[in-house]
Image (tube, helix red, strand yellow):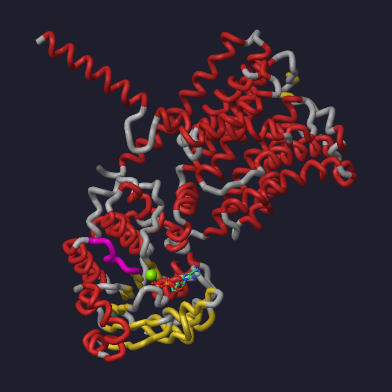
Amino acid sequence: MLLYCKDLTKKFGEITAVNRLSFDVKAQEIFGIAGPNGAGKTTLYNLITGVYKGIGEINFDGSEINNLDPHRICHKGIARTFQIPQLATSLSAYHNIKIAAHFGNEKNRVDKKVIDDVIAFNGLRDKQGIVADKLSLIDKKLTMVAAAMATQPKMLMFDEPMAGLSPLEIRHLMDLFKKINEERGLTIVIIEHFMKVLTELADRLMILENGAKLCIGPPLEVTQDKRVIESYLGNCYAESK
Amino acid sequence: MGHGGNLMKIKKDLGVLLAVYGLLALLPIFFHNNMSLMNILIISLIWAVVAGSWDLIMGFAGIFTFGQIAFLVIGGYSSVIFCKLFGISPWFGFLIGGIVAGGAGILVGLPCLKLKGAYVALVTFAVHMILEPFLKSDIGRAIGTGGAQGILTVPPLKIGSYVYNAMEPTPWFYTLLIISFIAFFIIYKVVHSMWGYSFIALRDSELFAQSVGVNAFKYKLIVFGISAALTGMIGGVYANYVGMLSTRILGLDLFLILMVMLVLGGMGRFPGALLGAFITMFISESLRYFDTYRLIIFGLLVMVLVIKMPQGIIGLIFPLGKAGIIERTILHFREKKAKKAEMIT
Ligand SMILES: Nc1ncnc2c1ncn2[C@@H]1O[C@H](COP(=O)(O)OP(=O)(O)O)[C@@H](O)[C@H]1O
Ligand SMILES: [Mg+2]
């Protein structure tokens, strides 16, 4: 077990965004998370990566990581991307990745090979000189993935990576994520609205609703679950049709 | 395109800095007899360092501090007080001013770390506001601030047997040229280091910066420290040049002028603050005739500049992402030449 969460809770005033949530992520698996808007998916990421402090226990790779600051959690081996692209917008893609390679390890040591590797791996060779602000959406997302990889993590967490992309770009990212998981042996957690992406990629899938776990298991089982179809997939499928 | 663009930008920044300093170094050849002009140039160099270090924290790190003059004053007073108390050379006094102000910067930075934009401005400006009554108070007097009167005698600056004096501005000018160059070179080095990139990343997206391992707490304190230290150091130099020190520089005049220097030069655009300082000083001097209206004109200037020219002078010469005046001029002449060549053939 790589990541283990127990009774995670986060309240914003009256709203309980994450409600006594317990689950675990196994090493090397692709773990999918889905659920309606406002279910608490992003808040869960923010709890795990130290952006928010909540109640409950978070254990990663054998040590407790609750109450650590975000940069310390990065050093522990968790890297993430954001639903709304977050980058050093006024610096080039190359420098965004260099920052991650430099600050992503405790000793602040840049390994040039790591930078070159993640740039090549994410197909950013021709784009690395472009200021992040001027990159296309897919290239912004690829730069976020490359930067996350440059911190040399054990686990990558993607927050709705496919949002706003064309079918071709989605296909490209899916293949890339598979490659990250298979070739690099990295554990992946992925929040996604497109069920097809999750059924194809995920080893296991967790459905959240109102901050709580509705269902967890292999994607094919979960998508057959009555509660899931009623509360989430029903209207989701209706939306896509 | 590789990341050569960034390398070129680094060289361009250093090139502009060297070019400006090269030109400045020539000025005394023509104007060494013009006392008032030399004085303006010297003061411009002093304010340039304040504006440049303010830009480091406000422009590059995106932290809206309004405490820069407070650090200038803290540096100035501690430099002079140490010199008088321990009889040390003013040269060391400048360093002491820098160290004390740097420490003060870190202390002021601490409560600001968790605050957002406007609140940082309020807290830092509160420090500015507190400073004047403190320096005038009995405690201040006990430390040696001279109370409301200020410090009226400052130990003179010497180099070998030469004593700097108000009648000979040229040695002062070259000394300030060197000191301010060192300050700008430090800023240049910081801006183009991994520290500098961490400041920019924290400014652009704190979420991103932290997620890839940037310790926001540490690097924000570092930028507070460096920015305040450089300003404090030049505060010591200022006190020595002017030959006295009082709380008058905490008035709104200087604050506004420094702000114009920053916006005019271009925030976060190295070395905009340096250019902004000289241009602003010359505008300010030519507005002297308008007396009280000067501040009104300056205030309006800040508003117009922020709206119409957010990248400042440097942005005009080297705009981000498109050809600037210099590049356009070169292109223009190239096209002309090409047309001529066409006509001949
Ligand atoms: N910083 C915040 N302050 C207040 N409420 C928040 C904050 N972040 C999220 N919420 C609330 O928490 C709930 C879960 O949000 P979120 O985690 O973003 O959902 P999801 O990512 O599943 O769409 C929503 O009701 C949202 O309004
Ligand atoms: Mg979300």
Residue A164: within the magenta?
yes
Percent of width and height locating residue B75: 72, 39
Q: Residue A121, image x and y in percent?
A: 24, 60
Q: Which residues are magenta?
A: A159-165
Seen from the viewer's position, the closer of residues B298 and A54 is B298
Most distant residue in the left direction:
B345
When the figure is inspected, residue A79 is found, relative to residue B173, above or below; the finding is below
Residue at screen point 22% across, 56% down:
A123
Task: Spot the residue most to the bottom.
Answer: A226
Please give the count of numbered marks on the rendered protein.
Answer: 0
Whether residue A182 is visible, yes or no, is: no
Q: Main secondary structure of the magenta part?
A: loop
Q: Quadrant of ligand 1?
A: bottom left
The residue lying at 55 percent from left, 39 percent from top is B55
> What is the quadrant of residue A232 in the picture?
bottom left
Q: Nearer the viewer, residue A164 or A22?
A: A164
Which image quadrant is residue B288 in? top right
Q: Is residue A126 above or below residue B271?
A: below
Q: Quadrant of residue A189?
A: bottom left
User: Which quarter shows the N terminus of chain A?
Assistant: bottom left
Please tell me which residue is depicted at 57% across the width and 59% down the height of the picture. B217
Asked whether residue A6 is in view, the answer is yes
> Where, quadrant-wise, is the C terminus of chain A in this rendering?
bottom left
Q: Residue at x 34, y 77 (%)?
A: A36
Q: Is residue B170 left or right of residue A138?
A: right
Q: Is residue A239 magenta?
A: no
User: Of residues A152 and B265, which is closer to you in this image?
Assistant: B265
Q: In the figure, is residue B164 to the left or right of A70?
A: right
Q: Nearer the viewer, residue B41 or B291?
A: B291
Residue A3 place in picture, x, y as percent: 40, 81
Question: Can you give x and y, in whole percent of width and height, for residue B118 in the image?
Answer: 60, 51
